[in-house]
Image (cartoon, rainbow, N blue to C red):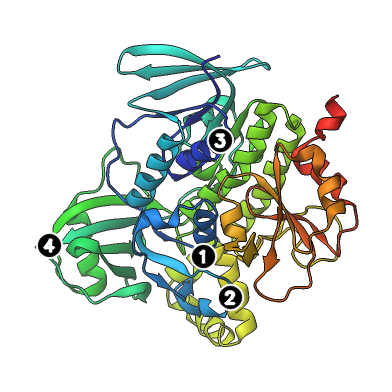
Amino acid sequence: MDAPVVIAGAGPAGLMLAGELRLAGVGVIVLERLPRRTGESRGLGFTARTMEVFDQRGLLPRFGEIQTSDQGHFGGIPVDFGVLDGAHQAAKTVPQSQTEAVLEAWAGELGADIRRGHELLAVRDDGDSVEITVRGPGGEHTLRSRWLVGCDGGRSVVRKAVGFDFPGTAATREMFLADLRGVELEPRMIGESLPGGMVMVGPLPGGITRIIVCEKDNPPRKRTEPPAFHEVADAWKRITGIDISHAEAVWISAFGDATRQATEYRRGRVLLAGDAAHIHLPAGGQGMNASIQDSVNLGWKLAAVVRGTAGPGLLDSYHDERHAVGRRLLMNTQAQGLLFLSGAEMQPLRDVIGELVGYPEVSRHLAAMVSGLEIRYDVGGGSHPLLGKRMPRLALTRDGRATSTSDLLHPGRGVLLDLTGNPVLRAKAAGWQDRVDVIVAEPATEVTTTAVLIRPDGYVAWAAPGSHYDLPMALDRWFGPSRADHR
């Protein structure tokens, strides 16, 4: 066996998953077709939920100074994200290339084997292991692993090789994205609908200006190369009347509005995460964020199965939880596309929604949907408001020192947080202390909760008072049988 887990793709999803597996002590090989990172960045920034994810792994300082904002949009209609409760706002100017660099360095430091210039060609799941044919710098060779995860993008070779169904709708239009140097354009951060189409303008670091162009009646084309700059400049002039042909194009890409989702995220010993599992219009910058969160949900579960502390059935919860999130992701991006990219016939609906977002409840609903803060998993019955939701960042005092719930999650382990010093809880959790840290701490603010069980991905699996089943049942469900059961 070359490694317990092989990951195809060294984008944000693959690198995040590699880091999560290594935190749990699981060996992993990451195969990446490209010989080096390109520096190109389709994604910009990350949502409040991804800020929380990076905070719980101690990664935020690696990004340096991050510009945040509580202003967002839904389909080009401004929405105040400041109505959301939370410790973090969305990051606005972090290019995807920087996110990938941070995650690659982190995963590498943890011991992930990242192999660039290695292209996955074929996959065979024999039931007990996965055989992977790879073409690398030295030619073709075969790897064998217990599990394979396809994080290899919307055109996933893994998904196609294993035969995952990928239903949905094909692209109906082509859009251009270009990073330009040497041009000054008025910012249009949330996009602007004009008679000829939709345009967006945003400043990037280093004197770069990013534009997005969606011209009406521009059908999708099968391209093997990026579009020429004159195509972008001509479309921009037809829509806006502004000539940008004198600019220098740093990077150009074309994309469409196809919407598809795999019907299952696991087939045998092969799983999908990120764009390999779902593609959609990049509205609201949600794609990279959902991909990273797929990996954080999957990583600890796959690690537990590899280590033998939990059975393969735990992986069913990965599909159950993240497929539902993906469905809502596709729904909201399709809705935004209709608002964003349709013509004048959609203006009455835009006006109505523009009125509705003036109500805090509506803004809160839409902002939570786009940012991922609305997610609530089915973790079992109970009346506690935190069950199934991410544990908010709570300031704590532990052994006389200041800490927080986010700090406690840095090691990527489960956390049983005891806020009252109850020895009964520690006794009940004794059989899981190889997987779950039992922490006694005092909250910095008054809370009604006395204890919470937090999964490694930050979601609350049990809380007191309010859970309808006892702590050992929750520990067994999410972390496998206690050590006493193995004796």
Side of 34 relative to 3 (left or right): left
Residue behind mark 2: 84
Q: Which mark is residue 48?
A: 1
Q: Is residue 168 above or below residue 143?
A: below
Task: Determine which of the numbered discs, if any, sits on residue 245 in the image.
Answer: 4
Q: How far apart are labels 1 and 3 at the CA level?
A: 23 Å
Q: In the rendered structure, which amino acid carries the disc numbered 2? A: Leu
Cα gap from disc 3 to disc 2, whole angstroms: 31 Å
Labelled disc at residue 335: none
Disc 1 vs disc 2: Cβ atoms closer than 8 Å? yes
Which of the numbered marks, if any, corresponds to residue 21?
3
Return the disc, 1 or 3, that comes first in the chain's sequence: 3
Which of pointers 1 and 4 lies earlier in the amino acid sequence?
A: 1
Relative image position of residue 193 (x, y in whole percent): 37, 75
Q: Please provide percent x and percent y for residue 442.
A: 70, 66
- 296 vs 67, left or right, is right
Sequence-first tag of 4 and 2: 2
